[in-house]
């Protein structure tokens, strides 16, 4: 993560590699980039994401109970939200949940990311 413009913009890059059984070399499993900004006029956060495959999302978000919650939208019967916070070890912990009624949420996604200093 990197703060820019005196904290008005937060740049976030997620990158994960690993090996499946039988692999001899690492492969990229996740590579995403995001930009988080405060939208003064709307009174919420703007969160723009882009994946290495070209897909991306323009979403809104808010702080709730010390966590950042954002939603890429959805229809009345298929709502999605992501909640990001720090776990006990200070790692980025994110869960994705889906709801058909806006009250009951079912997890479908989870990831925990550790910060790695790439500026060596």
Image: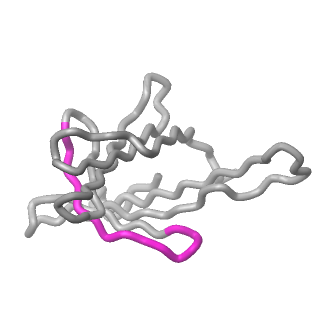
Left or right side of 17 for 100: left
Q: Is residue 73 left or right of residue 20?
A: left
Q: Is residue 18 magenta?
A: no
Range of the magenta residues?
51-64
Residue 5 spot, x, y in % from top left: 32, 64
Q: What residue sits 40% from the left and 33% below the top?
A: 86
Between 13 and 78, the residue placed more toward the observer is: 78
Q: Residue at x 25, y 64 (%)?
A: 74
88 to 91, vertically: above or below: above
Looking at the picture, does residue 50 appear above or below residue 43?
Answer: below
* Horizontal and vertical percent position of residue 44: 15, 59
Q: Nearer the viewer, residue 80 or 4?
A: 80
Coloring applied to the structure: one colour
Q: Nearer the viewer, residue 60 or 6?
A: 60
Q: Nearer the viewer, residue 68 or 115?
A: 68
The residue that appears at 52% across and 68% down in the rendered structure is 51
Type of secondary structure dominating the magenta stretch: strand
What's the residue at 49%, 25% (across, down)? 89
């Amino acid at each position: 993560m990197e703060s820019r413009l005196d904290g008005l913009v937060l740049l976030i890059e997620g990158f994960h590699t690993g090996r499946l059984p039988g692999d001899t070399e690492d492969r990229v499993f996740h590579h995403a980039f995001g930009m988080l900004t405060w939208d003064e006029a709307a009174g919420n956060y703007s969160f723009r994401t882009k994946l290495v495959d070209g897909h991306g999302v323009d979403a809104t978000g808010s702080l709730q109970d010390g966590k950042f919650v954002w939603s890429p939208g959805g229809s009345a019967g298929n709502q999605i939200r992501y909640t990001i916070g720090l776990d006990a070890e200070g790692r980025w912990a994110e869960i994705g949940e889906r709801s058909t009624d806006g009250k009951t949420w079912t997890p479908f996604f989870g990831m925990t990311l550790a910060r790695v200093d790439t500026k060596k």
